[in-house]
Image: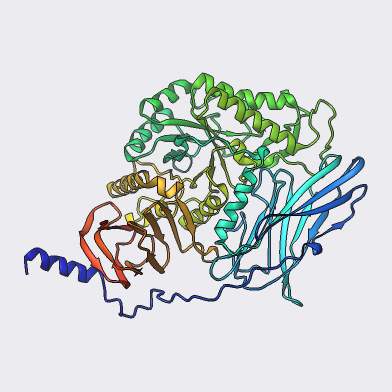
């Protein structure tokens, strides 16, 4: 036997342990159970409860496709009247239900005794899904009206072990009306739960009023954010230097966050609202310098705020919705044409005068009514509804900015995401999760399921320079199926961390067509998504966050396994055997094994370094 063959055999003996060896750390049991019958929903039991006042309600049922029903409700009054709080209620048996999903879930996705989500244009989305032990859909409930506030609440009644969903409408005051229409969509098909949720997103997008904004390629490139690294203490020189490094690592844009507009660093918004760049007086020079580094420039704005110390504060007296005392700011009322004009022109000026490439628009959820808000067209207001006025404002912003730059980038973050927000923005970001890789993973996975083709971004991730390179890499590996937003001070981190970022960002850029545009396959929400896969044509990328079994099917010619869990051992199940090559790399991209391999069908164990990668390529005849 040649020396090369001896070395190969020794390496394989280290990487592939015998498939019959017992290992309690790995779950080898894959049980197949008989599929449960689809849930039957008695549409006659779906009723409206509450004081209808002057309104009568007409209910009609349609079949969208087999297993999907649409129940429409038309509220009609002879004269403009106030819609009083009512509920749509029904029930279904709790059969083969093991968990639930809604856009608001974070940690507790198991205790479905009571689950709820409150949604409106600027907050989440009106959808609730229940799934079984095979992660197949049992029932997914969604509403057509994603602009006005609704709440979907579901609980299990102990006496009969049924779920009793209650859909609460009109609990947020609405202007008087003569007609209101809403459709309830009920999906009981036995498809993967994430498929039923994705179909809801498609259903919303088919509504011309919710047509999603164009998503340019630039929205799907890694970005550098100044927020966690610099917070409000930013300077042109430091950020341009960071851009030089970020560009070398694979970033294509910088998001300059809060702090540029004022010299105040108190983390409040008392001086915010004038949008004169006090801290960065030469903003055009700043933007040009970033462009010279080959990076795009995205600028942060708190969309609804006018600080009590802002020069423009007196200009809008009487045109505010409320005061946020702890932050020292007022919230502009979008129902006044003057406030909308001021907000829209602010962004047009930034686009024309400074040449920015996009906007991060923050705090949109503060455009909301309270119990004391007068919902009438009076005293200079040309809208009665704040929700409709916000829709008009955001539509005007989008239309006017895209008329200047069709590829303008607009980012929103949770919770102001959903079918309506896809009209106004092409980048959705996970909610703040500083140095919390697992929380970041959960949030972007929730976003991916609901956002369809809108670019989903991670929250800006950060770590301490004292962390091991494998631990630091988890911040990237947990958000692998979203667009990375890096926010560490690159000049301060160890060289091994820089190598790690470069390796994984290069890998992400090379494979983003699979990671972002391929079939997205999340696992169990109740276990915080222990593994996630994406497939495109004949390539599959699977990231493991807990010990589980990977199955490689014969139609997959390339399998990438990302080991983001605590142990090095990975269980691989082959249905038809495998003949090809395998490369194993550590988290800084160093190749520790590369050779041809041939494996029989059955179970095998791979040894992949923590935060490392294995690439298996099948020989194609």
Q: Nearer the viewer, residue 542 or 607?
A: 542
Asked if residue 493 lies left or right of residue 221, the reply is: left
The x and y percentages for residue 254 are 44, 35
Quadrant containing the C terminus is bottom left
Q: Quadrant of residue 159?
A: bottom right
Q: Residue furthest top?
A: 353
What residue is shown at x 39% (from left), y 25% (from top)?
Answer: 289
Indicate whether 416 appears above or below 5.
Answer: above
How many numbered tags mark residues here?
Answer: 0
Q: Nearer the viewer, residue 129 or 228?
A: 129
- Rendering coords of residue 187 (x, y %): 65, 59
Q: Relative to residue 30, is residue 241 drawn left or right?
A: left
Quadrant in the picture for the N terminus: bottom left
Report the side of 525 relative to 91 (left or right): left
- Seen at 80% across and 64% down, the residue is 45
Q: Is residue 504 visible?
A: yes
Does residue 173 show up?
no
Q: Quadrant of residue 210?
A: top right
Left-right relation of 516 to 432 = left
Residue placed most toward the observer, 582 or 228: 582
Which residue: 60% across, 47% down? Answer: 202
Q: Nearer the viewer, residue 288 or 214?
A: 214
Q: Position of residue 153 (x, y in %)?
A: 72, 60
Residue 146 % position (x, y): 69, 46
């Amino acid at each position: 036997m040649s020396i090369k063959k001896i070395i190969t055999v020794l390496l394989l003996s280290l990487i592939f342990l015998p498939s019959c060896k017992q290992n309690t750390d790995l779950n080898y049991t894959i049980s197949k159970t008989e599929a449960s019958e689809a849930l039957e929903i008695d549409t006659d039991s779906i009723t409206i409860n509450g004081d209808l006042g002057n309104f009568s309600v007409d209910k009609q049922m349609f079949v969208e496709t087999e297993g999907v029903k649409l129940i429409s409700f038309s509220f009609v009054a002879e004269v403009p009247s106030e819609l009083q709080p009512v509920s749509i209620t029904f029930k279904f048996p709790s059969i083969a239900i093991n968990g639930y999903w809604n856009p608001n879930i974070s940690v507790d996705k198991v205790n479905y005794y009571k689950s709820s989500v409150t949604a409106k244009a600027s907050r989440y989305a009106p959808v609730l899904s229940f799934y079984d032990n095979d992660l197949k859909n049992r029932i997914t409930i969604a509403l057509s009206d994603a602009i006005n506030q609704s709440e979907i609440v579901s609980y299990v009644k102990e006496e009969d072990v049924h779920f009793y969903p209650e859909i609460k409408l009109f609990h947020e005051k609405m202007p008087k009306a003569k007609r209101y229409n809403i459709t309830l969509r009920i999906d009981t098909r036995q498809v993967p739960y994430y498929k039923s949720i994705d179909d809801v997103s498609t259903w919303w997008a088919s509504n011309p009023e919710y047509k999603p904004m164009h998503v340019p390629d630039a929205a799907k490139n890694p970005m550098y954010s100044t927020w966690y690294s610099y917070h409000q203490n930013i300077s042109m020189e430091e950020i341009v230097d960071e851009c030089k490094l970020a560009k070398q690592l694979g970033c294509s844009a910088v998001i300059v966050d809060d702090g540029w507009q004022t010299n105040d660093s108190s983390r409040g918004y008392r001086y915010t609202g004038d949008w004169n760049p006090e801290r960065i007086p030469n903003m055009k020079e700043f933007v040009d310098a970033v462009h010279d580094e080959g990076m795009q420039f995205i600028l942060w704005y708190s969309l609804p705020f006018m600080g009590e110390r802002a020069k423009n504060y007196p200009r809008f007296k009487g045109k505010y919705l409320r005061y946020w005392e702890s932050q020292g700011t007022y919230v502009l009322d979008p129902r006044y044409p003057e406030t909308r004009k001021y907000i829209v022109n602010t962004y047009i000026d930034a686009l024309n005068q400074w040449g920015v490439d996009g906007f991060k628009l923050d705090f949109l959820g503060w455009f909301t009514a309270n119990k004391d808000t007068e919902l009438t067209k009076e005293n200079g207001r040309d809208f009665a509804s704040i929700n409709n006025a916000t829709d008009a404002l955001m539509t005007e912003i989008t239309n006017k900015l895209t008329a200047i730059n069709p590829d303008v980038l607009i980012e929103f973050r949770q919770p102001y995401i959903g079918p309506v927000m896809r009209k106004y923005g092409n980048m959705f970001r996970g909610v703040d999760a500083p140095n919390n890789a697992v929380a970041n993973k959960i949030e972007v996975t929730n976003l991916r399921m609901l956002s369809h083709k809108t670019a989903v971004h991670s929250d800006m991730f950060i770590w301490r320079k004292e962390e091991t390179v494998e631990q630091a890499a988890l911040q990237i590996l947990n958000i692998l199926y979203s667009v990375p937003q890096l926010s560490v001070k690159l000049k301060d981190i160890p060289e091994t961390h820089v190598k790690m970022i470069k390796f994984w960002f290069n890998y992400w850029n090379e494979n983003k067509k699979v990671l972002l545009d391929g079939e997205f396959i999340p696992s169990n929400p109740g276990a915080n998504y222990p593994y996630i896969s994406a497939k495109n044509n004949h390539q599959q990328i699977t990231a493991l966050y807990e010990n589980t079994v990977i199955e490689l099917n014969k139609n997959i010619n390339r399998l990438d396994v990302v080991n983001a869990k605590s142990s090095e051992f990975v269980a691989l199940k082959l249905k038809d055997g495998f003949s090809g090559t395998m490369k194993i790399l550590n988290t800084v991209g160093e190749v520790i094994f590369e050779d041809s391999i041939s494996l029989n069908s059955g179970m095998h164990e791979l040894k992949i370094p923590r935060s490392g990668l294995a690439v298996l390529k099948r020989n194609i005849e």
